[in-house]
Amino acid sequence: MPTAPIRKTIFFMLCPTIMAAVLTSLAGVVIISGPPQPQESLIVRQDETKITKGDWGQMYHYFAGESLATRNVLVAVAVVQPGKAVHRAHRHSQEEYLMLIAGSGVWSLDGKETVAKTGDVLYAAPWVYHGLTNTGAQPLKFAVVRYDGKGVELPPRPDKRPDEL
């Protein structure tokens, strides 16, 4: 049985080794539980998407999350029934692109309404009101890409309209 001074020496010699092992194992945990990794390149088929449904129609969610240069990404395709809209004109902090793939309707952008035709693309800057309503007799189909840029300071939220939640 080692004497007390030898036990202390062994303890202090092993202490850095034990600490290194503990820190190494913790570092592994930190890496595993670190920030989300950017989206890898891939192809998503429509039958692999998450689908949300409403009285207006349905939306196919292809991507959500972040990529190398963006965060809070949404890439989706919506099919909107005649006379309906996914929601009324709205605004948010993300930039957004909408492309009308099929059908016809009315764009709403910054308080102005414009006829929406197949092939049109709408860009909405942060906090600009925008929307799309199906005014045709057939289902309307549009693609949406919405995101925040990484390392980009978002403009502050303007005052709410009286009818905003």
Image (cartoon, grey):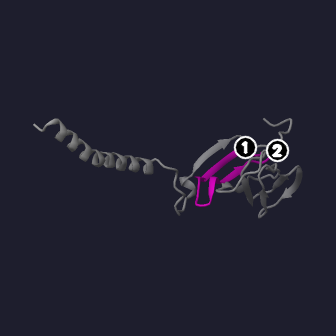
Q: Check if residue 24 falls in the magenta segment.
A: no
Amino acid type indicated by mark 2: Pro
Query: Which region shows up in magenta?
Result: 56-85
> Residue at horizontal 22%, vertical 39%?
8
Q: Which residue is mark 2?
A: 158
* Above or below, 4 relative to 120: above
Which structural element holds mark 2?
Answer: loop
Tag 1, which secondary structure?
loop
Residue 90 numbered tag? none
Residue depth check, mark 2 versus mark 1: number of the one nearer the observer: 2
x, y percent for residue 162: 86, 35
Residue kind at label 1, given as amino acid type: Trp
Quadrant of the image containing the N terminus: top left
Residue drawn at 89 percent across, 52 percent down: 112
**Majority secondary structure in the magenta region:** strand
68 magenta-colored: yes
Counting the numbered discs, the total is 2
Q: Which residue is mark 1?
A: 56
Q: Residue at x 83, y 41 (%)?
A: 159
* Residue at 43% over, 50% down: 32
Instruction: Give the CA distance from mark 2 to mark 1.
Output: 29 Å
Where is residue 124 shown, x and y percent of the image?
78, 55
Judge the density around disc 2: few (<14), some (14-19), many (≥20) Cα neighbours within 10 Å: few
Mark 1 surroundings within 10 Å by alpha-carbon count, few (fewer than 14), some (14 through 19), many (20 or more): some
